[in-house]
Amino acid sequence: MLGFASINLIRPQTQASLDTTVKTLVTDIAQQQIKAMGGDTDGTSEAIEHSIRFEANRYILFRGTIYSAAEPSNFSVNLEGSLQLSTSFPSSQVVFQKRSGEVTVPGSNTVTVQNIQTGQQKIITINKYGAITIN
């Protein structure tokens, strides 16, 4: 009984962790797009693109179109140990154009957040206009 009960308690926790991570990631994606659309200069003299780089265990919010690990304004979000990211975006990053907020890559691309222990996953799709859907 104890083993069955603990398995049933762990499953909702792993699902909640996945759901929370996806919601946070979607919010961060939308914020980067809003910054690009609003012409956020982030201390520069003109409006700039805002982007996100995806790595297996984290994602990084950054300014401009080219990621530099040495840039002090980068903001990194680490994933919980059992979660992993993968993406179909070229160079593993999405760039939102200044003023329009459109994505520089045509068509729809995805970001998958997966719990590597349970196999549960959520797929975030971002189309060329920056519209986000979750499956």
Image: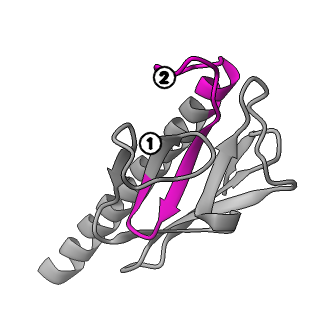
Q: Which mark is residue 70?
A: none
Q: Which residue is mark 1?
A: 24
Q: Is residue 5 left or right of residue 123?
A: left
Query: Which amino acid does the dot numbered 2 rest on?
Result: Asp
* Boundaries of the magenta span: 33-59
Question: In the image as oriented, which residue stretches furthest toward the front?
Answer: 45
Whether residue 1 appears in this view of the structure is no
* The C terminus lies in quadrant: bottom right
Is residue 28 located in the magenta-colored stretch of the structure? no
Asked if residue 122 is positioned above or below residue 42 in the image, the reply reads below
Based on the displayed image, in which of its 4 quarters is residue 34 positioned? top right
Query: Which amino acid does the dot numbered 1 rest on?
Result: Thr
In front of the other: 42 or 3 = 42
The residue sitting at 17% across, 82% down in the picture is: 3
Asked if residue 60 is positioned above or below residue 115 in the image, the reply reads above
Q: What's the distance in space between the residues labelled 1 and 2, CA to CA? A: 21 Å
Label 1: which secondary element: helix
Q: Which residue is mark 2?
A: 42
